[in-house]
Image: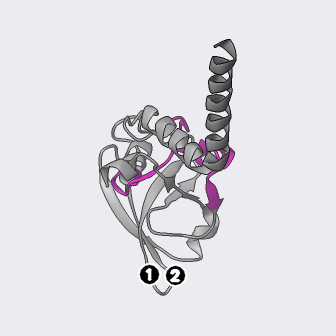
Amino acid sequence: MKRFITMIFVIIILSAGLYTLLNKHELANKFDEITLSLLPDPMALNTYTDGQCTAYAFDKVKENETMIERDWHDAKYWADAAQKDGYLVNKTPKEGSILQSSRGSLGHVAYIEHVYKNGNFKISEMNYSEPFKITSRILTPQDVTRYNIIHPKVNPKQKEGS
């Protein structure tokens, strides 16, 4: 009787091992899905100061269902922090990206609304002239040399709500 139970137990263990081996990609995907569902939405809470360019840029990125980090602090640090966090930072304007400058005591960020065929691009921004005031400007390809462009990542939590 002990041999029979031991044999059944060994068969069950071997079957489970074989199933795992043959379905490892499917099981890995399920594990990723479980992990993703347990993580909070990285864009759920805007930690930047209301009325400032950073809070505005965060909200615009969120509206676009992409993501940036909540801990980049003042705008002057954003490009370096973004690169350290694995974001693409370059000089190529793209709709939905962030224009960043380190000039001034705090720096500045703006949201790229549109890129025109001639290379000009429209930005919207808050606190360029005063807190809580939203303004927009058109910049040229020559202007971009003074800035960094931060390209947001896909927000994995948006897949659920989309």
- Residue 126 at least partly seen: no
Q: Amino acid at mark 2?
A: Gly
Label 2: how many residues lie within 10 Å, few (<14), some (14-19) or many (20+)? few
> Residue 135, image x and y in percent?
33, 59
Query: In the visual, does 95 lie left or right of 133?
Result: right
- Between 98 and 34, which is closer to the camera in this rendering? 34
- Between 67 and 77, which is closer to the camera in this rendering? 67
Q: Is residue 54 above or below residue 114?
A: above
Check if residue 67 falls in the magenta segment: yes
Check if residue 52 falls in the magenta segment: no
> Residue 123, image x and y in percent?
41, 65
Label 1: how many residues lie within 10 Å, few (<14), some (14-19) or many (20+)? few
Q: Residue at x 54, y 42 (%)?
A: 32
Query: In the visual, does 63 lie left or right of 105?
Result: left
**Residue tagged by mark 1?**
116
- Residue 88 at least partly seen: yes
Query: In the visual, does 14 lie left or right of 33?
Result: right
Q: Is residue 80 above or below residue 139?
A: above
Pointer 1 and pointer 2: residues touching (CB < 8 Å)?
Answer: yes
Q: Which residues, given as a range, are shown in magenta?
A: 61-89
In this view, the residue farthest toward the front is: 1
Q: Residue at x 51, y 43 (%)?
A: 30
Color scheme of the displayed model: one colour
**Residue tagged by mark 2?**
119
- Between 62 and 141, which is closer to the camera in this rendering? 62
User: Looking at the rendering, which quadrant does residue 18 occupy?
Assistant: top right
> Residue 70, image x and y in percent?
49, 37
